[in-house]
Image (cartoon, helix red, strand yellow):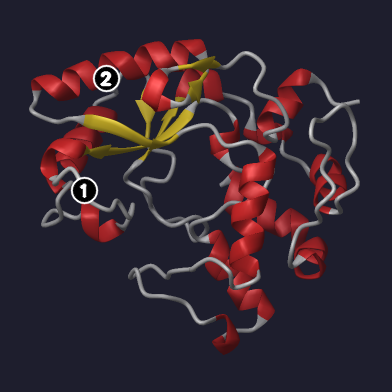
Amino acid sequence: MLDEQTRRACGLTALGLQACGADGLLMPETGKALGKLKRRAQRQGFDMRVASSFRDYHHQLRIFNAKARGQRPVTDDHDRLVDPSALSPQDYLLAILRFSALPGTSRHHWGTDIDVWNAAAVAADYSLQLSMAEYAPSGPFGEFSSWLRARVDADDAEGFYLPYATDTGGVAPEPWHLSYRADAAGLAERQTREVLEPLWSGSFVQSVEPPVTEPLALLTIVRPQIDALLMRYVVS
């Protein structure tokens, strides 16, 4: 039987999270810190909004499997569409993992991580992409991103940091992704092979509603290299 912290780490429970309006479900201290940071951003002329916060295992599985099956677009580091037919299954898997976590390993499972943007910089009907071009110096969120990075670098961001600030060869840089360090501490360590393999096989029914019955697409490619993938995309 999995303990509650392991369930939270893998997106199998929302216990302990609270509804924070348009900001989604968050850990209480994360929500408080976010409110402070948003107010500071507002004083600088930014309208800091949350594009994504908590996602459970099932939500992440739908995202990953749709990409694996070619039903949802996959882009490269330059925001260009990736053609699944032009890559080997292994290379296509790695292309997906640059921007989309394996279900059970996403930091968005925790209620501590958010994707943010500046609504004051664009029209009300703007279609948000969460792309590097948007957060580049010349992009619509360039000034906001620079302010945010400066606050994080000075350890002056109300306890938030940028877990994907630099490219270490795994997850692509994400200047929009903030994590509340105090609440997130230790959770990645619980995303282990022993927990994830039963989930990915679609045979996990331990008091989870709804039970995990859909297997992971590309599982035959993932299974032989689970430890290496966790080291590259989770631990690092």
Residue 102 visible within the image: no
Q: Please state the horizontal and vertical placement of residue 141, each as a whole percent of the image.
A: 18, 46
Measure the alpha-carbon separation of dots 2 and 1. Answer: 25 Å
Mark 1 neighbour class, 10 Å CA radius: few under 14, some 14 to 19, many 20 or more: few
Label 2: state its secondary structure. helix
Q: Which percent across, then down, holds residue 48? A: 24, 30
What is the number of callouts on the image? 2
User: Considering only vertical position in the picture, is 221 above or below 157?
Assistant: below
Provide the secondary structure element on which disc 1 rests: loop
Q: Residue furthest front?
A: 125
Residue under the point 82% across and 30% down: 208
In the depicted structure, whether residue 8 falls above or below residue 224: above
Q: Is residue 8 above or below residue 58?
A: above
Q: Nearer the viewer, residue 226 or 33?
A: 33
Q: Quick check: can you spot residue 108? A: yes
The amino acid at mark 2 is Leu
Q: Residue 37 shows which numbered tag?
A: 2
Question: Does 41 sit above or below residue 193?
Answer: above
Residue topped by disc 1: 125
Task: Indicate the amino acid at tag 1.
Answer: Asp
Residue 179 is left or right of residue 103, and the answer is: left
Q: Quadrant of residue 36?
A: top left
Residue 177: x and y in percent read 39, 40
